[in-house]
Each structure stands twice: as structure tokens, then as C-alpha cells.
Amino acid sequence: MNNTSLKKTYSGKVRDLYEIDAERMLMVASDRLSAFDVILDDPIPGKGEILTQISNFWFQKLAHIMPNHFTGDTVYDVLPEAEARALANRAVVAKRLTPLKIEAIVRGYLAGSGWKEYCRSGSVCGIPLPAGLREADKLPEVLFTPSTKAEVGGHDENISFVECERIIGAQLAAQVREKAVALYTEAAAYAETRGILICDTKFEFGLDENGTLTLMDEVLTPDSSRFWPKDQYRPGSNPPSFDKQFVRDWLEQSGWNKQPPAPRVPAEIIEKTAAKYREALRLLTE
């Protein structure tokens, strides 16, 4: 998506970054969809704009908890008018930050890889849990379960908090855990009032030039989180998905070995997924 006069510096699974100057960059959300760390051939129409609007909503709503990557500039401040107009709904001007080398994952419910591990060992990411929990049960307390941050095409690996401390330092690890849990807890409480349960989510943090911990990238979107419709939530089974889990479920059933290339996703799955993204935006922000 090189429809800007700025120099592209990075192309990730979903976002592309462009250089503005030493302090700022342009972050553009594409319609690409990644599942199981593989970028699918079939984009989700309008997804980049929807994700950007959801993220921007949360960045503003949670700004009292910690600083974020916003600079206060808009695309119209850094791009020619025509380019700015084309990218206005899917791009943000962001601070240049030094990303932490971990993913900050927070879990409020027992699902996904956490449920599989619990069935085997009674723990999630090595954290022991009470016996007798069911799939999709609300956890006794919110869990911070960090992982490594893989390159594009690689797989993130769950790590212990001790390993997280080793990678980024004990003081910073404690701060990341505290902020990640606070962000999730407030967001989950709000989302529940709008009919969405946030099962789990992933935050990205960076440090600014003064070493201040800063929230960055995307926040509490259907790409970085597992959203469940509250009215269909029944502990004991995996709730119907409200996000890209819809595509993940289809891929799981397709027999794909989760190595590139991914199978082509049917048009009706693409459209249902796009409709879920639009519904999430409407419920959260209207």
C-alpha cells in the first residue's frame, strides 16, 4: 500500500510504517489479515479503517492510565491533501518509540492455548489455577502472560514472568504488568456494558526518548483481542467469535497445517468477518 510520498520503513503482518522525521512516523493499517502468524491472501474489505477507529477510541479512553503514541498531529499535517484524504481513516501520526522485546498478553477468561494448557497441566503459561474450571470460565484473577515478539512469519512463544524480567529488566517488567492489567481491566468493564466480553488481548509497549513507558501500535481491536458476544456467552464451551477468530475457526477445520501458504478463505467467511468487525466498532463507539 505505497500510496504515500513518504518512505516506507517497515511492512508488518497488518500495518505499514512510513518515515516522517526523527520523532514521528506514519502508521497505516492495511486490510490484510494474519492468522497463526501467516498473512492470508484474502484481505477483509474496510478492516484497516475499522481497526484504526477502534484503536483510536481506546487510546483516547485509556489515556489517563498511561501515555500513548499519539503526537497530536493528523495525516493532513504531514501529507499532501489528496494522500491525506485517501489515508485519513486508516493512518495515524505516531511517535517513534523503542519497542519492548516482549508482547504483553492479558487474559481474563480461560480459552484458546490457555485452555489447552489447563487441560494438560492445570496451569496457564505456568501459572497454577484452581481445579474444575471450564472452557471460557472467567479466571479467578486477570493474568499477565507475556510472550516473545517474533519477526514476521515467526511464532510468538509464551514465556514466564521471570523470563520477561530477564529480557526487559525487573523494574520495567513490573511496570508493564501493572499497566497491561489496568488497561485490560478498565476496557473489559466498559466493553461488557456494550455487550462485548474481552476474553484476552495483546498490548504493545515502547519507550520514548526519556525512557517513559508508552502504549503503541493498536489497542483492543478484534485483531489483537478475542471478543465474545455477551448474550451468547455460556461457560463450558467456546463462545461464538466476534473477531478474526471466525477465520481462525474456519482455518482450524480446513485441515491446514498452519504453514505458508494459507488456503484461500471462502468469500462468505470474508464477508461474515467484515460484518463482525463493523459490528464491534458500532457496539463500542456508538
Image: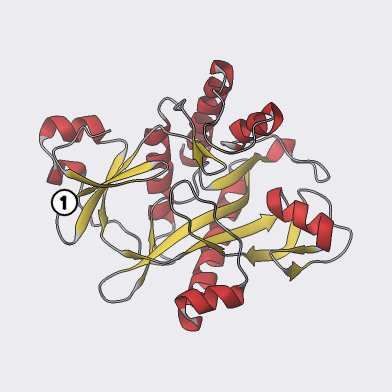
Query: Residue 43: x and y, percent?
Result: 44, 27
Q: Nearer the viewer, residue 3 or 212?
A: 3
Q: Nearer the viewer, residue 224 or 149?
A: 149
Of all residues, the one furthest to the right in this rendering is 132
For the N terminus, the image quarter is: top left
Q: Residue at x 49, y 30 (%)?
A: 278
Compared with 56, 64 (above or below) is below
Amino acid type at mark 1: Ile
Quarter where residue 118 is shown: bottom right
Quarter where residue 61 is shown: bottom left
Q: Which residue is mark 1?
A: 20
**In the displayed structure image, the side of residue 69 where residue 44 appears, left or right:** right
Query: Residue 35: x and y, percent?
Result: 55, 39
Quarter where residue 162 is shown: bottom right
Q: Residue at x 69, y 64 (%)?
A: 125
Label 1: few (<14), some (14–19) or many (≥20) C-alpha neighbours in 10 Å: some
Q: Residue at x 61, y 38 (%)?
A: 258
How does the figure colour the protein chain or chains?
secondary structure
Question: What count of labels does the image hold?
Answer: 1
Of all residues, the one furthest to the bottom in this rendering is 171
**In the displayed structure image, the side of residue 85 where residue 153 appears, left or right:** right
Q: Secondary structure at mark 1?
A: loop
Compared with 5, 255 (above or below) is above
Query: Residue 66: x and y, percent?
Result: 40, 67
Of all residues, the one furthest to the top in this rendering is 267
Query: Residue 182: x and y, percent?
Result: 54, 66
